[in-house]
Amino acid sequence: MKYKNLVINTPEELLFGNAPKPVKSRRGLEIGGGKVYPELNFTLPTMTIDDSTLPEVYRHYREIAEDALARAVDLDSNGVVLEFETLLEMTRKPKIGIEIVKIMNEVCENYYQKYGLISEIRLTPNDLREFERPALQRTTKLLDPMMELFEKGALAGGDLLSIESTGGKEVSDSALMMCDIQTIVFALAVLGVRDMRFLWRKIVALAHQHGKIAAGDTACGFANTAMVLAEKKYISRVFAALVRVISAVRSIVAVEEGAVGPDKDCGYEGVFLKAITGIPISMEGKTSACAHFSPIGNISSACADLWSNESVQNIKLLSGMAPTAYLEQLEYDVRLMNTALKEGTVPAHVLQKLMVNSDIYTDPQALILAPENVIRISKSLVKADSYVANARDGALTALDIIEETLQSGQMTLSDMEIVYLPTLREALAAIPDSESDFIEMMLPQLDQSKFILSEYGL
């Protein structure tokens, strides 16, 4: 890992709306520069996407952007990010995704010229490689439409470039269900790291070529999957918390390769990236309930520079269309945060403390996101020489924090959760410092028909 020290060293510095390395967008949003902005995430209602429905598809996206930005003007918004998270057909056929970016960018530019409202588009293509098994991470032809959408979508108006990449997921999926922490480390800190390096070199080069912002990745397919499984009581919440920490060593590779933030909203591991690298981050919480439930509704906003929701369908509610309603909710949230920042350091930290204290002891997944714990865990995530050892050390520190909090009586867990603690600690402690030793240890235990080592440069 390139980072050996933290950019943010104290919990007091790890605050919403402020990042040591703010990012300025094309139209002038300064993300991490003293204000929090809403980032609206949306999708189509249930419908088929084919040639016959494309006019309707395009109409939906134009209306989403028009209605959301009109409401933003009415609310005197400081600025908005619209995340275009593509659906599969839009990446498989890049011309569809490119046309949607053009349509949305026309709306953004119109509202900028007419009302002075600053808005930008985050373009997030699908990682199509997930749909081949075993995945051909480096040699598949599916990379071609992905990169075409990145490049031509950027030229069409996508200013922030992101992806939910999935390298290692063919190994992690079964490991999540079995609460196999060693295999999770292999999937994320060995396979995931290598794939992130390969993919983000391409994305960063493209961003530099066209004057765009290589924003960042998310371990959504790993850590959010764990969170959702834990919320449904399929797996341990403690295990899900450790997966979140481990995922940071994978997601930070985008920054090592030149991404500058803001990372993607569903990457709750972004708090560790912010502490280590100083980049601004996007976070989501309570307003993600449209897509998934979670135990981290308020605490996730404690360090956010963009405050987002999850994909909400463009359907009619009593007030209006759902994305517009969610934009209003996000806008009121960021208005409160920005008012606290404007009032000064003490009010901002009081608000942050309330956000943190409302969730911190309700779930180990919330506990690890408290700023003081983020700093402590982040120090462990950078102290070793290998990604594997850093993943191990970060997870062990998180486990220390969980056990200390249990012993203090501040948090309680069920017997089913507590029984995992010694098992997880033993498995983590058995992971060697050396990546090569760890690979040698793990390969005999893994079903190698599920993945191709050469596709990860091994």
Image (cartoon, rainbow, N blue to C red):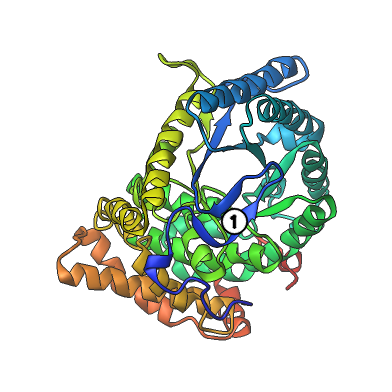
Farthest residue toward the left? 409
Farthest residue toward the front? 343
* In-front residue for pair 51/204: 204
Is residue 421 found left or right of 331 in the rendered image? left
Helix, strand or loop status at disc 1 = helix
Please tell me which residue is depicted at 61% across the width and 32% down the height of the picture: 117
* In-front residue for pair 14/434: 14
| Residue 43 lies in quadrant | top right
The image shows residue 359, relative to residue 122, as above or below, that is: below
The image shows residue 286, relative to residue 24, as above or below, that is: above
| Residue 350 lies in quadrant | bottom left
Is residue 159 found left or right of 190 in the rendered image? right
Q: Position of residue 179 (x, y in %)?
A: 41, 62
Q: Position of residue 341 (x, y in %)?
A: 40, 51
Q: Is residue 183 visible?
A: no
Residue wearing tag 1 = 169
* In-front residue for pair 295/157: 157
Is residue 363 found left or right of 182 in the rendered image? left
Q: Position of residue 441 (x, y in %)?
A: 56, 80
Q: Is residue 190 visible?
A: yes
Please tell me which residue is depicted at 72% across the width and 45% down the height of the picture: 26
Quarter in which the N terminus is drawn = bottom right
Numbered-mark total: 1
Please tell me which residue is depicted at 62% across the width and 60% down the height of the picture: 168
The image shows residue 446, relative to residue 339, as above or below, that is: below
Please tell me which residue is depicted at 73% across the width and 28% down the height of the picture: 100
Tag 1: Cα neighbours inside 10 Å, few (<14), some, or many (≥20)? Answer: many
Quarter in which the C terminus is drawn = bottom right
Q: Position of residue 379 (x, y in %)?
A: 45, 77
The image shows residue 102, relative to residue 235, as above or below, that is: above
Q: Amino acid at mark 1?
A: Lys
